[in-house]
Image: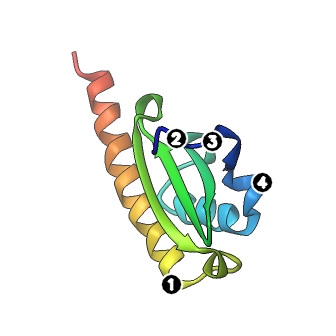
């Protein structure tokens, strides 16, 4: 993230775009990833919206993508693909974190 970002411009995805958040959680739950395994935020950047999802131990891993504001009003293929990419990446990260934790 840009160091000049105004923290007040970052909003929880759940409150800024509830339909996108619900879809994201639905897609993640299909991979046994729960809402408490991620932190999803959005940030308006002019005519675009950056959606950022953090996951993994202490939410150290970040996956983000920018969409035009017109395309975030409803679910489309770009957002659906974004959700699938997050699900796969998050699943791999959570599994790796688990094995690090149980390693003797």
**Disc number lying in front (2 or 4):** 2
Position in image of residue 39 (x %, y %) = 58, 43
Question: Is residue 26 shown left or right of residue 84?
Answer: right
State whether residue 24 is above or below residue 96: below
Cα–Cα gap, marks 1 and 3: 30 Å
Quarter of the image holding residue 97? top left
Q: CA distance from mark 2 to mark 4?
A: 23 Å
At 28% across and 31% down in the image, what residue appears? 99
Foreground: 14 or 7?
7
The residue tagged 1 is 77
Q: Residue furthest top?
A: 104
Q: Nearer the viewer, residue 95 or 4?
A: 4
Q: Is residue 65 above or below residue 60?
A: below
The N terminus sits in image quarter: top left
Mark 1 and mark 4 in contact (Cβ < 8 Å)? no
Indicate the secondary structure of the residue bearing disc 4.
helix
Tell me, yes or no, whether the two marked residues, 4 and 3, touch with CB atoms within 8 Å: no
* Residue 61 tag number: none
Local crowd size for mark 3, using a 10 Å CA cut-off: few (<14), some (14–19), many (≥20): few
Q: Which mark is first along the chain, 4 or 2?
A: 2
For the point 51% across and 84% down, which residue is it? 77
Residues at marks 3 and 2, CA–CA distance in whole angstroms: 6 Å
Mark linked to residue 4 = 2
Task: Identify the secondary structure beneath mark 1.
Answer: helix
Direction from residue 7 to residue 98 in the image, left or right: left
Image position of 91 (left or right of 49): left
Q: Quickly name the residue at label 4.
A: 15
Few, some or many residues within 10 Å of mark 4 (<14, 14–19, 20+): few
> Callout 2: helix, strand or loop?
loop
């Amino acid at each position: 993230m840009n160091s000049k970002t105004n923290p007040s411009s970052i909003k929880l995805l759940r409150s800024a775009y509830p339909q996108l958040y619900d879809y994201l959680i639905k897609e993640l739950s299909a991979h046994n990833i729960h809402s408490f395994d991620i932190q999803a935020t959005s940030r308006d950047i002019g005519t675009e919206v950056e959606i950022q999802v953090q996951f993994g131990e202490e939410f150290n891993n970040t996956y983000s993508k920018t969409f035009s504001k017109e395309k975030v009003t409803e679910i489309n293929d770009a957002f659906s693909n974004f959700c699938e990419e997050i699900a796969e990446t998050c699943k791999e990260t959570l599994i790796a974190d688990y094995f690090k934790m149980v390693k003797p």
